[in-house]
Image (spheres, coloured by chain):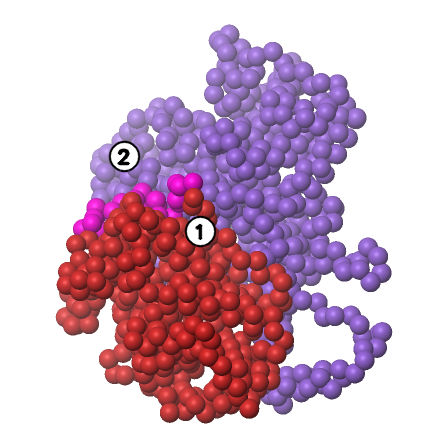
Amino acid sequence: MASSVSSQQDKVLVEANSFARIITLNRPKQLNALSFQMISQLLELFLVYEEDPNVKLVILKGKGRAFSVGGDVASLVRDMRADDWRVGANFFSQLYKFIYLIATYSKLQVSILNGIVMGGGAGVSVHGRFRVATENTSFAMPEAALGLFPDVAASYFLSRLPGFFGEYVGLTGSRLDGAEMLACGLATHFVPSAKLSMLEAALCDVDSSDPAIISTIIDQYSEQPSLKEHSVYNRLDVIDRCFSQRTVEEIISALEREYGHQSDSWIFATIQTLKKSSPTSLKLCLRSIREGRLQGVGQCLVREYRMVSHVMRGELSKDFFEGCRATLLDKDKNPNWEPSKLELIDDARVDCYFCKVEHEEWEDFKLPIRSKFELPPYAIAKL
Amino acid sequence: MDRASQRTQILANHLLQSSPPSPLSSNACLSYSPPELSENYAFDVKEMRRIIDGHNVEERDWLFGLMRQSKLFNPKEKGGKVFVSPDYNQSMEQQREMTWKRIEYLLERGVFKGWLTEKGEAVEMWKFAGFEVSSIYDHSLFTKLGVHFFLWGGAIKFLGSKHHHEKWLMDSENYLIKGCFAMTELGHGSNVRGVETVTTYDSNTGEFVINTPCESAQKYWIGGAANHATHTVVFSQLHINGTNQGVHAFIVQIRDADGNICPNVRIADCGHKIGLNGVDNGRIWFDNVRVPRENLLNSVADVSPDGKYLSSIENPDQRFAAFMAPLTVGRVNIACTAVYQSKVALAIAIRYALTRRAFSLKPNEPEVLLLDYPSHQRRLIPLVAKIYAMSFAANYLKMLYVKRTPQSNKTIHIVSSSFKATFTWNNMQILQECREACGGQGLKTENRVGHLKGEYDVQSTFEGDNNILMQQVSKALFAEYVAAQKRNKAFKGLGLEHMNKPCPVIPSQLTSSTLRCSQFLVDALCLRERDLLNRFIADVSKCKAEGESTQQAFLMCYQLAEDLGRAFSDRAIFQTFIEAEATLPAGSLKDVLGTLRSLYALICLEDVSYVRYGYLSVENGASVRREITKICSELRPHALALVTSFGIPDAFLSPIAFNWIEANSWSSD
């Protein structure tokens, strides 16, 4: 029988069910935005479950219409007084610890993405073994429009999407539906939301941690959704030609050339989106994906932590604060980016984000030690 | 039975047998434990990579990424990771087509933008980086690009004049024209001055007439000629009014835009090779092919419309040397590339040695990791030191080349010859050692190390046979010596300034700290070079005194010449290491480089010449070897960090470098 237990912190609900544990993000009004406390609690739970021989499977889902919109950036910005970047750095350090644990988890994680999945929400699901999308799923990495860049080791998973689709998703913040997530590999399964409760029940009956067995069970509830007619995933050839270019400037010129050949409104909209985003963010995002493509997940996090620490310090650019102001706080949707143009940001300036932060209290992100458990091959492959 | 149910049954069997374990079944299965989780990095590997790659790191990663993400580069998933490598099981024709498709793909992405039309250090360095990265994927890709950009494009740039540049470079950069380079003949390879192709001038039509007079004059090994090239640069004797003016270079179209071979040109295939089957090497015959007068690449010599020979360089030797200019950049490129193949092989061998175990020291103990055997350390870690030394030397060579002046041409020629020969020989040695260190797994093509031997063997032959290049080095040193004596002047250039100082003395007893002192190591390497140069001079003089010609004397003193060439290379490479080390701030990175620097020099001191000529006593020779083993065990904890710093992405290594158990599991086949 399932035993249902609410933790003291009701923003993360836990249900123990024979060999499965169901964790529900329970902050529906904020679309399950992850606060520092929630992240710490999740981290704690995952660590306990890893030690517990009675746990074979962790199911992660969200209450309400979102799985999670990611880190609770709005309150983070409020909490960070003008000069205190440490609060921000601390937040990301805790989040990245959790991401690394997920990416190298010795047990199986099934994330049920029945709603909005953004930024950190993608981070706490995509690195896990199974990601179940539904007809309600809406995925995006919108950080570049916010003056940030896709972090949570997104540089690892975006860079490994087919061709240069990852660059497209990361730079434009374009939304993907469940079918598109499955097609590009961000999701491992597509299950109609009507069948989710049956799927959960079936997973709770299993006493195996063999991914092949779990996959077969999810398969029983899965469908092969078809891509909608105007899906971006049908535009891979254009995306590959343009988003494989070396620099953001060249990507935009390639899109403009492409628009010259075929006056396609999707290409036009893509160009407009890029032109509206923070130029600094675009450059950081592109470089991050390009480096991440050749790095393990741990090295991606170490690098992203350097980058995000620089962003929090705001010495190189204050676009993150400006983006949050314009999008989340004042909501005037009219950010004033500085530097305002791509041409004003040279390679040397971008390089700075990839260097250590020169501050006595700052240190590189230390990857948690993961040699205690025997890692499954799919986790080893990410190192 | 399908795999899933078979697997379920195996699992079920395991569970059913879970009764008390019998003593016979107590052995646990081997499991792969990733070195990333057990080995620590004591220094910043990204910073180290930046230092040894030296330039264009971001562009390199872009190019790696372009190849990693394209189906054309044949990605294969093994053990949960993606690896890209050509399918060498394809037929020669298929491999050639794939090489060409890969070039087209990179062309469309703008990789070659500016490679022929832009000038300056920045684009030249990026070009070198681009070649290094493409070679890490596949030597055929590298070679086909090298022929087009460095040989064909280089010939037009260096040997042509303004109108040639305007007419050919942009179209070549965009591959509207596909070039090749017809120098070598069946009968003449290294001795280019002996080629038998003959060109005459017909002043009635204003055309050159190019002819292959005999079978030994057929152009041979011409990369690109068999399938794809539309144009070639032909090296031919130029006969004007009955006088042979020596070797000159002409542009000849060999195929039309549709790929049909032009009239009076015959082309045949060189056939299957031990490697580089993705390059269409061909043989060309010219049957009195007529080309316009403008097709003579005329930067050093020209023929007027009425058929007069005009040259700005009177001396035929110098004129010939000028024609060899395109080969110099090729040599620089080959030398640098060889270092990267060594990096690929060694990163694979070291990673494998950090995960593969063999034999227990005591019964019931776990087996020992290969790299924890001192003998295995001794095989691989000195090669790591060699690669670091060669990396610095390669960066020095590239800088020397891109900052070239008319005065530095001689130095570039000597240093590039010496480094090209040394690096490519080292590469073959390293590949062989790594292949053996990977045992049977080294023999699988997918694991790369063994296969690379066939692919890279050619490096000791093309763009100058290694032995001949090294003879040129010793001859040049001889000439320096004679010139200094004649003019009673100090040595200047080629790093020979140490000859002006008193001869260094090796201490009679070498302690550990002396053996790691860079001054001592420099002294020891200079001492050998100096002494061998003196001996070479003495022996050549003796031969001449006995009535031999200078040429004959050189030939007879070949043993000393070879030892001297090696002594020069080792010392010159070491100097670049010391210089690179000196630019770094104190810290963990500099410390580990200091240890590698000592190890590199000590393996040079282990060379038989040190005992043969008595620079080291037998006891000191033994001290050197002892110190090498000590340093190897000191560097053992850094092994993973040192090869990670090579910056070769995982996808360009091979399955045995990672989870080789999973890669070979039943379910991943």
Instruction: Indicate the colour of chain A.
Output: red
**Pointer 2: residues within 10 angstroms few (<14), some, or many (20+)?**
many
Q: Is residue B470 visible?
A: no
Q: Quadrant of the C terminus of chain B?
A: bottom right
Q: Quadrant of residue B105?
A: bottom left
Residue B408 image position (x, y, % from top left): 40, 26
Instruction: Tell me which segment is drawn in magenta.
Output: A338-360
Pick whichever, B280 or B580, lies toward us.
B580
Front residue (pair A167, B389): A167
Q: Residue furthest front?
A: A8
Residue A134 against residue A91 in the figure, above or below: below
Q: Residue at x 34, y 61 (%)?
A: A150
Q: Which chain is purple?
A: B
- Chain of the residue that carries numbered disc 1 in the rendered image: B
Q: Which residue matches tag 2?
A: B303
Where is residue B524? Give x, y as percent: 64, 23
Task: Confirm whether the magenta stretch covers residue B491.
Answer: no
Quarter in which the N terminus of chain B is drawn: bottom right
Residue B522 in picture, x, y percent from top left? 60, 24
**Residue drawn at (51%, 77%), measured in percent from left and top?**
A58
State left or right for residue B45 relative to residue B170: right
Label 1 sits on residue: B133
At x 51%, y 23%, the residue is: B495
Mark 1 vs mark 2, CA separation in Å: 41 Å
B14 left or right of A180 in image:
right
Magenta stretch containing residue A353, yes or no?
A: yes
